[in-house]
Amino acid sequence: MRTKAIVSLILALALTVSAFAQAGQRNAKPASGASSGGIPAPAVTLIQNATILTASHGTIKNGSVLIRNGKIAEIGQNINSREANVRVIDATGKYLIPGIIDCHSHTAVDGNVNEGSLSVTAMVRIRDVINPYDQDIYRQLAGGLTTVHVLHGSANAIGGQDAVLKLKLGKAVDEWFVSDAPAGIKFALGENPKQSNFQVQGRPRRYPATRMGVEETIREAFIRAKDYMREWQEYEARKAKDKNAIAPKRDLMLDALVEVLQGKRYIHSHCYRDDEILMLLNLGDELGFHVQTLQHVLEGYKVANEIAAHKTGASTFADSWAYKLEAFDAIPYNTALMTARGVNVSVNSDSDERARRLYLDAAKAMKYGGMSEEEALRTITLNAAMQLGIEKRTGSIDVGKDADLAIFSDHPFSVYTVPEMTFIEGEVYFDRKADLAQRDALKKEKEELIKRERDQRGAPRGPRKDEKPDAPQLRPNDRPNKGPGS
């Protein structure tokens, strides 16, 4: 009975966490601008009196945005709506920006993000392992994040297929995927795919084990993909004349690489050093593929002209480096220097924690390199949308685009600002007022669940005969000094 009670408590607490994750949607009142992830928002929403940072055409003071059926219908000053049941949100003294886009995320991946058994795993798909109950989803919505580019890990020279998601918490997962986002695939260069940092003792080394091996792995894979593509082209030509023509054997790994060669699938490549960046760009010239974005690209400032000449984007960190040897030459001016050379640059998180405050990471581009306010804002909005091929529907506050928006209490680049509301296609997925109101209810619910479990357990039990009492662990400075070598 006691075991069943404990299981019941665990399940109840899990439901409580899920309830907290959706509190801003389920309990918010329409008057405050909130809606449920499962209930359609009002057909018309009007956000009034905000300072609007459009990310595309400057700043509009005391501005308004009219949202109709999930799309931005009007932008300007003194906008009114005569339609019935319009939801009005007063944003006086607040700032409205486009929903933040994270161009490098591993949020909501269920289990290991790496299929590390092979060097080339182009056949696996991140979309098959999306976990909509990941608690980081709600936390990132609470930071104004609306769209994430979920990538395979970097254990492979050619990794898995990616997914572009909108964080529609409470909706069916199928509704999260941005259906018209171009398909993508993760590549990786350097220490991670050659596995110089995480060898398991006793396990044979997997090829490749050197940087030159990484290059040759990618080259060999695309040579095979070209042969495979030619076989299918020849089959299609024969099939028109010979009904008995036999199709080549289907290979899901090579199918993905053929899509890259045909320009139907974008390459997003993990990299750090300038030499490996040039290697991949040159390899693309040799084999006929284009690199859409270089991810991390911490030494991109050294070869920014070459990156720009290839029309390749760069998705970098604001100020994260020195965590391994490859990252030692990183500088905080990387974002501004690449931008000045004509590279489309975004700032990403690669972290469930940093993703909650990308708006502050964007601000660092103004401190380190003197980028303008709009240039810095674009690094987490419009530039990221362009890198993912979704700029026609999101990334800036323009008429006709999806109403993916975030309201901040102060300027989004201020350390004192607080994200207050996050919209995806006109629906509110985070409302700070509703969140605060829900916390007392959740605390009370937790206390009731704990009391119920204790009541079911009955009288307090003593320790078992084989059970050792809890003892505090000594901290390093509390341990007895045993001399050198201890």
Image: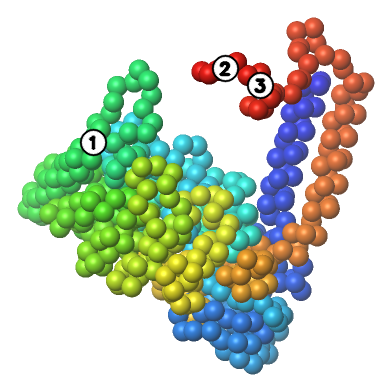
Tag 1's secondary structure? Answer: loop
Q: Does dot 3 land on a helix, a strand or a loop?
A: loop
Along the line of sight, which residue is nearer the eye, 117 or 163?
A: 117
Q: Nearer the viewer, mark 1 or mark 2?
A: 2
Mark 3 packing: few (<14 Cα in 10 Å), some, or many (20+)? Answer: few
Relative to 60, residue 8 above or below: above
132 and 270: which is toward the camera: 270
Provide residue 222's location: percent of width, then percent of height: 18, 46
Counting residues from the start of the chain, the first of labels 1 and 3 encountered is 1
Where is residue 83, by image quadrant? bottom right
**Is the C-beta separation of discs 2 and 3 under 8 Å?**
no
Q: Residues within 10 Å of mark 2 (few under 14, many from 20)?
A: few
Q: Is residue 200 visible?
A: yes
Q: Disc 1 to disc 3, how far (Cα)? A: 42 Å
In the picture as drawn, the residue positioned furthest to the right comes out as 459
Residue 4: x percent and y percent? 77, 24
Q: Is residue 285 left or right of residue 72?
A: left
Dividing the image into 4 quarters, which one contains the C terminus?
top right
* Residue carrying label 2: 483
Work out whether 404 lies above or below 230: below
* Label ID, residue 479: 3
Q: Which residue is mark 1?
A: 210
Q: Is residue 253 left or right of residue 166?
A: left
Marks 2 and 3, how far apart at CA: 11 Å
Give the amino acid type for the residue marked by disc 1 in the picture: Thr
Viewport quadrant of the N terminus: top right
